Image: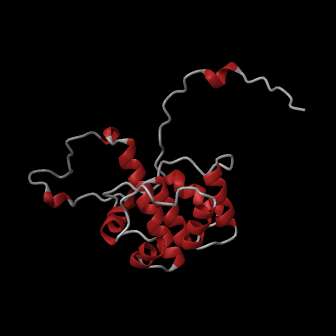
Amino acid sequence: MVESVRIPKIFFQKRAEVKIKCTLPITSIPVPPTNSFPNSSRPTTSKPFSALTRVNWLSLLLRAYITQLCKQKNMTVSKVLDKADIGTSFGYAIFNGSRKPSRDTVLKLAIAFGLALDDTQKLLSAAGFGGLYPKIKRDAVIIYTIQRGYTLFQIQDELTRQQLTELGAADHDRR
C-alpha cells in the first residue's frame, strides 16, 4: 500500500540562483607578483573578482581537491591517470584546471583514487555534477561496485554484463 505524500508548494517555486562559497584559503589562489605590473603597487584585472564564472570556481575547487587527494594517497598524477584510463594530455589539463572533465571522467578519477562512496559523491559535487543516484540503474551498479572496492576494469565488466554504458564510453578521454 502506497501512502500519498503532500508536497509543499515551496518545492515547485523557482529557486534563487545558488552562490558558491569558496572555501579555499586565499594563499591557494595564484596572484601574479606586484612587480609585474609597472607603475602600480597592486595588480589589476580586466574583470572584477565577482565576475568569475561558476565554471572557473568549480575548476578551482576540483583542481584543489584532486591535488589534495594525490598528496593524501601518495600517488603521482601519472599513476592516477594510468589507473583511471585517462589520456595524459587530457588528464594533466584536468589537474591544471584548464579542462573540465565529464561526469564519467570524474567517476574514473574517484575509482583510481580508491575513494569510498561518500568521498566519490564529494568529488562529483566539487566538479559540479550531481551525485550517484541509486534509482538510476547505471548509478546503482556503480554504487554497488564502489562499495565493494572493484577496480575500474571490474566496474566496466559489470556495466557491460548489465548491458549498460561503460564509464567514459562517450568521452574522448581515452588514449
Q: Can you give x and y, in whole percent of width and height, for residue 160 in the image?
A: 57, 63
The residue drawn where x is 33% and y is 42% is 52
The residue drawn where x is 34% and y is 59% is 97
Q: Can you give x and y, in whole percent of width and height, for residue 10 in the image?
A: 65, 22
* Closer to the camera in the image, 21 or 40: 21
The residue drawn where x is 59% and y is 50% is 131
Q: Residue furthest left?
A: 39
Q: Is residue 101 visible?
A: yes
Q: Can you give x and y, in whole percent of width and height, for residue 127 in the image?
A: 47, 53
Name the side, left or right, on which 120 lies relative to 88. Answer: right
* Closer to the camera in the image, 19 or 97: 97
* Quadrant assignment for the C terminus: bottom left
Instruction: Tell me how many marks there are.
Output: 0
Name the side, left or right, on which 66 lies relative to 89. Answer: right
Name the side, left or right, on which 151 lies relative to 39. Answer: right
Q: Is residue 118 visible?
A: no
* Closer to the camera in the image, 172 or 52: 172
Q: Is residue 131 above or below residue 27?
A: above
* Closer to the camera in the image, 140 or 11: 140
The residue drawn where x is 45% and y is 56% is 24
Q: Is residue 22 above or below residue 107?
A: above
* Quadrant assignment for the N terminus: top right
